[in-house]
Image (cartoon, grey):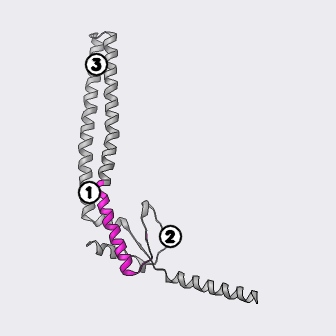
Amino acid sequence: MKKVMKAVTLIVLLATIGITAHAQKFGYMNSTAILSEMPEVKQADANMEALQKQLQKKGQQMVQDYQVKVQGLQKKEQAGELSPKQIEDEAKKLEGEQQKIASFEQDMMKQIGDKRNTLLKPIFDKVEAAIQAVAKENGFNYIFDTNAAQGRVILYADEGNDVTALVKSKLGL
């Protein structure tokens, strides 16, 4: 009798798991395709490029100024216009200039990263809200991104479950 009960319990459990598994609805989308069509992303990219060019120009000017000072010091040294103490002092000043340039480069990278996050966060929030709305409206339990983190998250997907067009529609693209 115990064996029969175990067998019946096992069959009921397997049937329940099978029904539950079939009840799940999965979808997938291509976030890169969606983001590439959003005007907000294009504007953010343009703003990022403008900031990057501005900062690079400033950095290049700093490097050029440094190079002029190095050449000036070398000319004075070769002409014998400076004492060894003066050369040492000027070399220390130039070392400080080098450190300022390196610090500026690090700060530039931080500024660009911060600006990127500031510009893209509202866009990502908007896309996430559209994905959640599509999932709820269409009864999806899960939606996967085929391009998450620059790599595929899933290896196979039925084309009938691609919700990229639905998300684009929700975003008005």
Q: Secondary structure at mark 1?
A: helix
Which amino acid, by three-letter code, is at mark 2?
Leu
Which residue is the site of mark 2?
Answer: 155
Q: Is residue 147 left or right of residue 47?
A: right
Residue 108 in picture, x, y percent from top left: 31, 42
Does residue 96 belong to the magenta stretch? no
Give me the residue at 34% from left, 25% from top: 95
Which is more N-terminal, label 1 or label 2? Answer: 1
Which amino acid, by three-letter code, is at mark 3?
Leu
Position of residue 155 relative to residue 62, above or below, is: below
Are there few (<14), some (14-19), or many (20+) residues within 10 Å of tag 1?
some
* Magenta residues (range): 118-144
Disc on res. 73: 3
Position of residue 101 relative to residue 94, above or below, is: below
Give me the residue at 40% from left, 76% from top: 162
Which is more N-terminal, label 3 or label 2? Answer: 3
Are there few (<14), some (14-19), or many (20+) residues within 10 Å of tag 3?
some
Position of residue 99 relative to residue 89, above or below, is: below
